[in-house]
Image (cartoon, grey):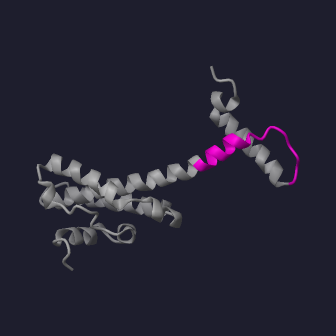
Amino acid sequence: MPDTLYDQDILLWSEQQASLLRRVANGERVNGVDWPNIAEEIEDVGSSILNAVRGLLRQAMVHLLKAHLFPNDMARGHWLIEADTFLASAGDRFTPSMRQRIDLDTIWRRVRATAASEANTALAALPERCPWPLDDLLGSSPRDLLSTLAKPEGKP
């Protein structure tokens, strides 16, 4: 059975802690600030945003691959719009410190394996490494990204 407000009602805990922190910021001495859990929650906020950006990039790659693997499908336009939406959202949430923490090749390998099995496509038909640098994913249109994917690896 939870024995602290943090365990029982995180919403109420967060509201109370925010109020106490505002008082501390105004120079008031207060008791009851739950420093260990506040530190953990602040860290969790950053991790959540990083994971959200990774997930948005993954979703964008899934839709880009669908558009690449099924160029004549009626849903292709929808997939490109979805990819654009996911990439824009990732760009909105991206911060410079995330650059070293986002492993595009790991994300790509998972997307590639899933896409290959769903499309009955040989993995060899898809690049082994992510074909897009992070800056391109965050700053290029899905159609431009697709044109890069369509080129044989290692060729401009």
Measured as percent of width and height from the top left, residue 115 is found at 20, 51
Residue 37 lies in the magenta-colored region: yes
Q: Is residue 70 visible?
A: no
Measured as percent of width and height from the top left, residue 132 is found at 31, 68
Q: Is residue 140 visible?
A: yes
- Residue 37 appears in which quarter of the rendering? top right
Measured as percent of width and height from the top left, residue 93 is found at 49, 60
Return the residue nearer the eye: 112 or 89: 112
Q: What's the magenta region?
A: 27-43
Q: Residue at x 68, y 34 (%)?
A: 12
Asked if residue 22 lies left or right of residue 82, the reply is right
The correct choice, above or below, for 133 with respect to 27 in the image is below
Measured as percent of width and height from the top left, residue 9 is found at 64, 30
Q: Residue at x 22, y 61 (%)?
A: 128
- Residue 33 appears in which quarter of the rendering? top right
Q: Residue at x 32, y 60 (%)?
A: 105
- Residue 82 appears in which quarter of the rendering? bottom left
The correct choice, above or below, for 71 with respect to 31 in the image is below
Which quadrant: the C terminus? bottom left
Residue 150 lies in the magenta-colored region: no
